[in-house]
Every structure is written in C-alpha cells, then in structure tokens.
Image (cartoon, rainbow, N blue to C red):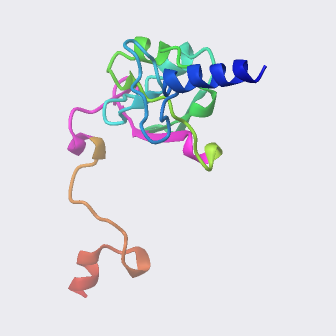
Amino acid sequence: MIFAKIRQALICLRAGKVTLDYPAKPRPAPEGFRGYPKIDVALCIGCGACAAACPARLIRVDDIDDSHRRITRLFERCIRCGRCEEVCGEGAAQMTTCYETATDDGRNDLVHVSDIEMGTCRRCGRCYEPDSPLDKIMKPGMRCDKILRGGNCPIDEEAE
C-alpha cells in the first residue's frame, strides 16, 4: 500500500507543472475569440442600430434634446455575441480579445455612457453626424462661454 503511494507521488513529480501561472502571466486569447466590445465614441453617429440588434438588451438610447443623444451600455450583461459589431455601419463597435472583467466595482466600472452631439437637418429635422467639430456648434458668430461671474461674456466685462 505504501509503495503504491510512493509510486504515485513519483509519477506526479516527474510530470512537472501542469497548470498555468494565470494571474502572473495572462494567457493570450485564442484566434477568433470574442471578448467584450470596445466603443469608439468618435466614430459613433448615434443611430441606435446596436441597441436594436443586441439580444441581451444592454444598450439604452436616450434623446436628451434635439441635438444630443446619450447611449448607455451595461457591459455586465454582455454575452459577447458580436451583433453590435455586425450592424454598426461606422465601425464604432469592435470586438476585442479582452476577457477579464473582474473589478472591485462592477456596477460602475462596466457601464459605458457616451454623449453624442447630433446635427439636425434644418429642412427635415432628422439627425446626422456633422463632418467637422466646427459644424457641431451649428451657431454663427463668435463663441461666448459663460464662465465668469454674472453669466456675461468676458469681453463685455472687460469693456466696462
């Protein structure tokens, strides 16, 4: 009986290490692996196609006003199906090979909120993504940021 145990111990010692040093050395994902999606807000036009195609219903689209749209994604519910990447015509949603979602605060760390400024057509009122950042302002004339006391333009206060 004791010889059988010694023989078994020698077989196990001869085999060497059979596990991975996972936390110290992360293993790369295999080819074709779908991790959680990465969203490029600069490419997103706010069409909401990803929200309509998502089977887990983790994407919520809210219209704040006529020219602002908020898209909230709850990645804690993501099933990594890749439908958001398939339907995104602009390439804003890309599946990554990242699979580690462990976090101290999953309710907040796995939430992605993006605010998108939408341009509206003056003729039909439908939204579109402006070509340049200057077109997003959509207001002629000089810019007036109300950041000083009283809410007046800095130029007006200096003139007084």
Q: Residue 157's spot in the image, x, y percent?
A: 28, 83
Which residue lies at the image location 24% right of the left edge and 40% below the top edge?
135
Which residue lies at the image location 29% right of the left edge and 47% below the top edge?
137
The magenta stretch spans residue 6: no
The magenta stretch spans residue 124: yes
Which residue lies at the image location 55% right of the left edge and 36% below the top edge?
101
- Would you say 92 lies left or right of 21 here? left
Q: Residue 25's spot in the image, x, y percent?
A: 42, 37
In the picture, residue 40 is in which quadrant? top left
Question: Vertical placement of 106 versus 28: above or below?
Answer: below
- Outermost residue on the bottom side: it is 160
Assign the C terminus to one quadrant of the image.
bottom left
Please name whichever residue, 81 or 35, is drawn nearer the observer in this view of the structure: 35
Q: Is residue 37 visible in the rendered structure shown here?
A: yes
Magenta residue span: 108-135
Question: Vertical placement of 1 versus 73: above or below?
Answer: above
Which residue lies at the image location 66% right of the left edge and 25% below the top edge?
6
In the picture, residue 1 is in which quadrant? top right
Q: Residue 77's spot in the image, x, y percent?
A: 63, 28
